[in-house]
């Protein structure tokens, strides 16, 4: 075939062609998954599972094939762009080929069994039936870290899948700082009491109107437009995409209407990040967000820093009035702003507010680190969980389902994943502060006109894709490594105001 | 890898595994195509094209790989089911590998250019700019037939893609018979005149109500249910599926509401055929309808023989009244039945009724046969087209856009495809007559209760997939080869009644 001859003559072109095929197989998998969550008839599930496994298998085969390694070696990179493609692809290739097939297969089996055991255990709120599976997942995590290799801590080798270059030691330092400076704030808020009326958050807001209002703002405020994106419903909201011009977000409609609105804007943040990656990385492994943490910084910025701000509701109150007159009756923008910024310690991470959220993450980080190091036994985990919940949030879970069993992550072997949520929160404020050093951006944000901010984010964060590390992006965009300072200052400023603590 | 060792140890298992992968890649392509027509944001089109080309390329590579041939040779078939898989896969493999890569690439390029030229030519109603492309497509068709090989007529080698085993000679005979016995009927209908009121067909019928009514009947009358199927909108209606439990039909809503209703039931016929293929062929090349003609027999049966019958409208008139009171006002089931069965010679195939439709097909069959044989030059085609339109339907197209340029098929190199529409019409009546030999089925049809008929179709037609040829299915199900007799009798019975010609 003439295509094959080209391949031999120009290894860089051959490499790009192969990476393009791998990317395309990934897009097909992604579409099958999106369709499964949004449109697929129920009875199609079994065969769809087989189809997705085939695509994943072919993609893995093509990528870990020795030929890919040979092309990476032979491809003399020319420009900077190609250097980045080779660098990122080699990083992924070496990680993928360091794990023997037997290990990958064993891990997949264990993961599958642990996931089913977790579903059952959560249903019956019975940690003991999940315990042996979690033990096995932790053993596999340790073996995975050993196979991958690491300088100082096995956790680093695992976290690299989610937050490349980040180290446990750095997370530990930043989290300790954050904890020491926000736990007193939380205690002051709780002590102050809360007389606000939150019933507005469940006033009647028809499902179609919720979705339409959220989607219209995603376009108008945040730039996510139907020409290159769409919104659908699914049981759990998510963002996926099959190219930077084919972005899909999903939402869920509840009586508690903020779930739909803020969920939509959260996913819009993820989508706009993927939208902003430069077209020159198209169909290469560079063409994605740099890390889960950087991704979360974008989704949290839209969801919390922008959409939970007073200027946002001042600007969009009339639109909400038109969309849901029963919700806004007798209220003004200030009352809405107040209602969507309730602080309240609670048991469940995904329902937590801006002040308490990070304590849920610190707890998980500390526990998984101790499990990996062996200073905590899996059998002691529920007790340790409950003790930390009491220490941080003053609550004790009534059962394991509302405690240690609430998240899917550990059952899926995702160790080193949780910190990215808080890293994203911290980075969101650090980035917004840096952007607002430009007076035009600051003025825009104060009027809820985000065009200049979106441009800044595209230039300083989005466009680079994976060609820069999260740390490079952070330092280049904000002039310093990640720090808890901006977030701590933001929380104090916002919530001392709301709760009258000055 | 352990999987590879299994492959060597058991060639039949290895073959099934490979055919499964090929089927799964096809399903992914199908989903990408469905999504493109129904949901995809506009700007995603360019990259989606690349992604679909990758999947098609990988699928083709995997299938035409010498390893597939070796597995077909080595796979000692055990049971009947496996014999069918090997037989059908070998048929496809030999056809696919008979065409050299250079030919396939040239054909794809020519097809692409011809398609764009056709779009332009049709827009400007200018056959001359399309002429060189059509010449090239006919040359390629002749070469393709030569490469494939054939016994008596090159047309047979082409038609095999759409109607395996059918021969030009047989089509010629059946079509001549059909023409001689239905052209007099058409002339009598035209001579009789038509005083019916067709304005009911464009009375106000809200879009959502059209879709909902059509979809509810697709389930209630024809068995196509949301548990394994869904309905969406697209510019051109189609059916596709990614397994027998994942069927997708699309529809289009127009002021002329029968387009949505009968279009939906037409696609439901295609879908229920795919639904009915036995699960034992899952993820093999046997797992599809036997041919386009047999497929069309099912869609036409639902659309015309059942949904354009008086019992259907007697049964569903109350539901229509509830769904669209403005449509039914002052009417009864009989008036509706009359309105949806208008006979009127017209220029456009896709708008034709049951009596005139087949003349559009005969005309195309005769012309493409003459082009392939070389007895007609491409330059003479528009004239020949218009002469035949005058001969059969008494009409002369005012321009080529409404004449020879109206269909996409020839620009896509689909020579030998058109006859399947009429073969399907003929088979639809032949099958229904055979089924109605069972009094329970006949009684059901007379009450528009199609459960017993659907069971008969599943047993006699659907379940076999491609394990039987169209002719085997026809003979086993109806006791005779395909004939024009049943269709001719059906047309006379129905339309002599409607037009009072007795």
Image (tube, coloured by chain):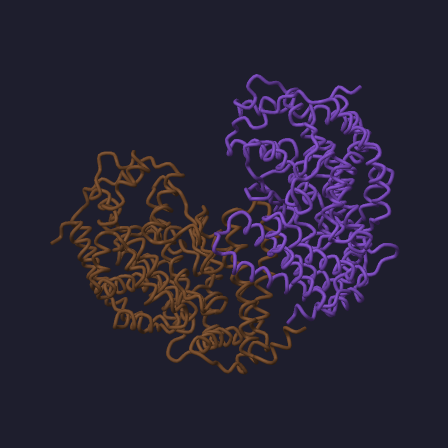
Chain colours: A brown, B purple
Q: Residue at x 80, y 57 (%)?
A: B87
Q: Is residue B425 visible?
A: yes
Q: Which residue occupies the foreground of this view, A393 or B118?
A: B118
Q: Residue at x 46, y 52 (%)?
A: A121
Q: Quadrant of the C terminus of chain B?
A: top right
The picture places residue A309, in percent across and down from the top left corner, at 24, 51
State the image quarter where residue A65 is shown: bottom right
Q: Is residue B428 left or right of residue A27?
A: right
State the image quarter where residue A209 is shown: top left
Q: Is residue A303 above or below residue B486?
A: below
Q: Is residue B443 left or right of residue A417?
A: right
State the image quarter where residue B299 is shown: top right
Kindly give the residue lying farthest to the top in the view shown: B330
Q: Quadrant of the N terminus of chain B?
A: bottom right
Q: Which residue occupies the foreground of this view, B465 or B231?
A: B231
Q: Residue at x 28, y 72 (%)?
A: A481
Q: Is residue B497 above or below residue B70?
A: above
Q: Which residue occupies the foreground of this view, A319 or B281?
A: A319
The picture places residue B155, in percent across and down from the top left corner, at 81, 53
The picture places residue A70, in percent across and down from the top left corner, at 57, 80
Q: Is residue A68 left or right of residue B136?
A: left
Q: Is residue B112 above or below residue B222?
A: below
Q: Which residue occupies the foreground of this view, B492 or A281?
A: B492
The picture places residue B402, in percent across and down from the top left corner, at 65, 42
Kindly give the residue lying farthest to the left in the view shown: A502
Q: Is residue A362 visible?
A: no
């Amino acid at each position: 075939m003439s295509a094959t001859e080209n391949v031999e003559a120009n290894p860089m072109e051959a490499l790009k062609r192969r990476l393009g095929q791998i990317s395309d197989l990934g897009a097909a998998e992604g579409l099958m998954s999106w369709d499964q969550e949004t449109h697929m008839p129920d009875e199609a599930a079994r065969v769809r599972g087989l189809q997705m496994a085939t695509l994943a298998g072919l993609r893995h085969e093509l990528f870990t094939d020795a030929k890919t390694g040979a092309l990476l070696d032979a491809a003399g990179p020319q420009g900077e762009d190609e250097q980045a493609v080779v660098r990122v692809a080699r990083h992924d290739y070496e990680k993928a080929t360091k794990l023997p097939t037997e290990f990958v297969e064993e891990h997949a089996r264990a993961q599958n069994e642990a996931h089913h055991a977790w579903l059952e255990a959560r249903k019956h709120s019975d940690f003991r039936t999940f315990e042996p599976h979690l033990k096995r997942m932790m053993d596999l995590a340790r073996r995975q870290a050993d196979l991958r290799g690491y300088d100082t801590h096995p956790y680093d080798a695992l976290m690299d899948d989610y937050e490349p270059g980040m180290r446990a030691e750095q997370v530990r330092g930043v989290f300790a700082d954050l904890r020491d400076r926000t736990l007193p704030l939380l205690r002051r808020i709780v002590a102050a009491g809360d007389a606000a009326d939150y019933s507005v958050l469940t006033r009647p807001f028809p499902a179609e109107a919720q979705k339409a209002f959220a989607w219209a703002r995603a376009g108008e405020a945040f730039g996510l437009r139907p020409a290159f994106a769409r919104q659908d419903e699914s049981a759990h909201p998510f963002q996926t995409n099959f190219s930077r011009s084919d972005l899909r977000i999903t939402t869920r409609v509840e009586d508690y209407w903020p779930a739909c609105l803020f969920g939509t804007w959260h996913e819009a943040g993820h989508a706009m990040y993927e939208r902003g990656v430069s077209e020159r990385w198209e169909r290469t492994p560079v063409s994605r967000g740099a890390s889960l943490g950087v991704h979360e910084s974008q989704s949290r910025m839209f969801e919390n820093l922008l959409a939970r701000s007073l200027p946002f509701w001042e600007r969009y109150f009339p639109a909400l009035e038109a969309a849901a007159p029963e919700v806004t009756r007798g209220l003004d923008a200030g009352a809405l702003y107040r209602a969507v910024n309730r602080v309240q310690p609670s048991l469940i991470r995904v329902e937590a507010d801006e002040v308490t959220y990070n304590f849920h993450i610190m707890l998980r980080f500390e526990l998984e680190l101790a499990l990996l190091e062996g200073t905590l036994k899996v059998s002691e985990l529920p007790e340790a969980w409950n003790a930390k919940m009491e220490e941080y949030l003053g609550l004790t879970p009534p059962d394991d389902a509302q405690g240690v069993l609430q998240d899917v992550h550990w059952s899926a072997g995702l160790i080193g994943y949780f910190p990215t949520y808080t890293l994203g929160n911290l980075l969101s404020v650090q980035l917004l502060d840096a952007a607002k050093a430009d007076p035009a951006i600051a003025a825009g944000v104060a009027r809820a006109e985000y065009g200049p901010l979106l441009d800044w984010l595209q230039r300083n964060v989005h466009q680079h894709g994976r060609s820069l590390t999260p740390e490079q992006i952070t330092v280049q965009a904000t002039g310093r490594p990640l720090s808890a300072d901006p977030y701590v200052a933001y929380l104090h400023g916002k919530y001392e105001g709301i709760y009258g603590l000055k």
